[in-house]
Amino acid sequence: MKRVLLLPAVFLLICLSLIGCGPKSSGDVADDLAKQVEKMSGYKSKASLSVQAGKTPQEYEVEVWHKKPNFYRISLTSKQRNITQIILRNNEGVFVLTPHLNKSFRFQSEWPEKHGQVYLYESLAKSIISDTARKFQGEGEQYAFEVKADYQSRSLTTQKIMLNKSLEPVRVDVMDSNMNPMVTVQYNSFELNPKFDEDAFDKERNMQAAILDSVPVIAEASAENQERSFGVIEPNYLPKGVTLKGIDKVNDEDGVQIVLTYTGEYPFTLIENKSRSAAVSFVSGEPVDLGYTVGIMVGDMNKTLRWDYEGVEYTLSSGMPAEEMVEVAKSMFNQVGK
């Protein structure tokens, strides 16, 4: 009799075990991901980043170091130009370092909490966890999520995030409203809970090390900057109803400064001059990913967006929405001076 009663009990345990080992749901993976991000002490990652900017994709090598709670080092190296920019966050604030120009900006910011970045693990996790309308599929040894995108650009609406079974990122594709891939991140390595040198996030160490790596580029950029006459470079995108009012050329101690004035619903001023070395401190602001370079957004109502590209320093000032300013700046990529 005992043997007869024991068989159903064993059968029930086997069934429960099989149920417990079944495929995980979207919610299960999201919960596990939230726990992993909460428990981790940090990570190191290396990835290839491709950005659709104009006809030719811009390719970057991206290295990310993150040490909890809020230390960051993001190195972005352009494969086409062999130029590196570094975003650094430590106890002193947030820095954007441009070693080949010997230029650095420092400011107080909540970055990256305010806006996520496609190459940050915690940003990807947050996108998955917070989007209750997420689409999910288990693909072999990987999990695939389709969720909303929020990356300081209104043209990027959806992203597909691939994770392995250890919940480490494998690939990210960010799409526009027509589901065309505009940004792709392919991970080459990912390490959870690594050890960091004591000065790994020190500004001077990172700046000097990057300058030493960039010495040939600095010399080349300096010579090019001296000889180059960049002309008038106009944006390829303007907000609706905005038109060019006038162009002025002003001579200052550093050469010619070009001032473009635009009028309309969102009037703005765009100043162009040769890139110069600088170490500037701001009270508030945040880095802005323009696809082809990293800019600095400062201000609230009246904002200023600064960036450097191909030996030219740009300063865009306006009260227009930040998203519109980013679109104007992005449209400057590969524009030829007149």
Image (tube, rainbow, N blue to C red):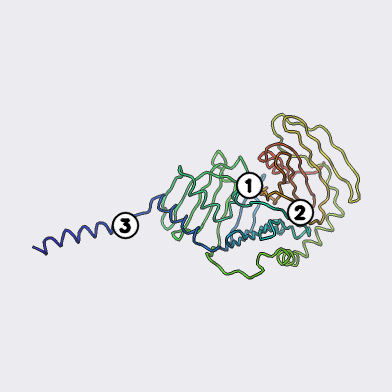
**Which residue is pictured at 72% across the width and 53% down the height?**
107
Query: Which badge, 2 or 1, is on the more N-terminal residue?
Result: 1
Location of residue 204 by image quarter: bottom right
Q: Which residue is mark 3?
A: 20
Q: Which residue type does callout 2 highlight?
A: Ser
Compute the Cα span from label 2 to label 1. Answer: 32 Å
Mark toward the start of the polypeptide (2 vs 3): 3
Name the element at disc 2.
strand
- Image quadrant holding the C terminus, namely top right
Q: Which of the labelled discs sits on residue 8, or is there none? A: none
Secondary element at tag 3 = helix
Quadrant housing the N terminus: bottom left
Badge 2: how crowded within 10 Å, few (<14), some, or many (20+)?
some
Q: Residue at 71% of width from left, 49% of height from top?
A: 284
Residue 163 rendering spot, x and y as whole percentages = 48, 56
Q: Comparing marks 2 and 1, which lies closer to the viewer?
A: 2
Left or right of 96 in this view: 22: left
Q: Which label is found at residue 281? A: 2
Q: Secondary structure at mark 1?
A: strand
Q: Residues within 10 Å of mark 1 (few under 14, many from 20)?
A: some
Q: Which of the numbered marks, if any, corresponds to residue 52?
A: 1
Mark 3 neighbour class, 10 Å CA radius: few under 14, some 14 to 19, many 20 or more: few
Give the residue type at disc 3: Gly
Residue 26 horizontal/vertical position (percent): 41, 49
Rendered residue at 72%/44% (across/down): 299
Residue 290 screen position, x and y as percent: 68, 47
